[in-house]
Image (cartoon, rainbow, N blue to C red):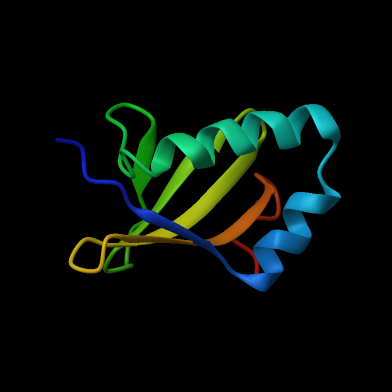
Amino acid sequence: MTTTYRIQLARSAVKEYHELPDHIQARVRKTIDAMASEPRPAGKCVKIANAINRWRIRVGDYRIVYDVDDSARVVDIIRIRHRKDVYRG
């Protein structure tokens, strides 16, 4: 039996998603949908240093930054930005 995670997007992440080009939106959407069944896919995600439970997944030149709460089964997407901007601010 596969237990799914609930996906939550921060308001800022929703805005960033809608500002992406259409072809990138489709790839990001596919990645986010896959995170519901496996939030930490082997070989695709990287733990962010100095953060307790923060991860990132690369989608082309863009990054999805998110937190995972295993006890509540929630993936909280914080940012969806170009790689040059994702860690600023």
Q: Residue furthest left?
A: 1
Which residue shows up at 75% across the image and 57% down it? 16
| Residue drawn at (79%, 27%) of the image | 23
Query: Residue at 50% of width from left, 54% of height from top?
Result: 65
Image spot of residue 72 (x, y percent)? 25, 68
> In the figure, residue 71 lies in which quadrant?
bottom left
Side of 53 where 67 appears, left or right: right
Q: Locate the C terminus and report the quarter of the image it occupies.
A: bottom right
Using the image, determine if residue 86 lies above or below residue 62: below
Q: Quadrant of the N terminus?
A: top left
Residue 65 vertical position relative to residue 35 in the rendered view, above or below: below
Q: At 33% from the left edge and 52% from the top edge, which residue is drawn?
A: 5
| Relative to 18, 84 lies left or right | left
In front: 43, or 88? Answer: 43
Total numbered circles: 0
Instruction: In the rendered view, tell whether residue 51 sits above or below residue 28.
Output: below
Residue situated furthest front in the rendering: 1
Residue 36 percent across, percent down from the top left: 39, 44
The picture quadrant where one finds residue 22 is top right
Horizontal and vertical percent position of residue 29 = 62, 38
Please provide percent x and percent y for residue 43: 32, 26
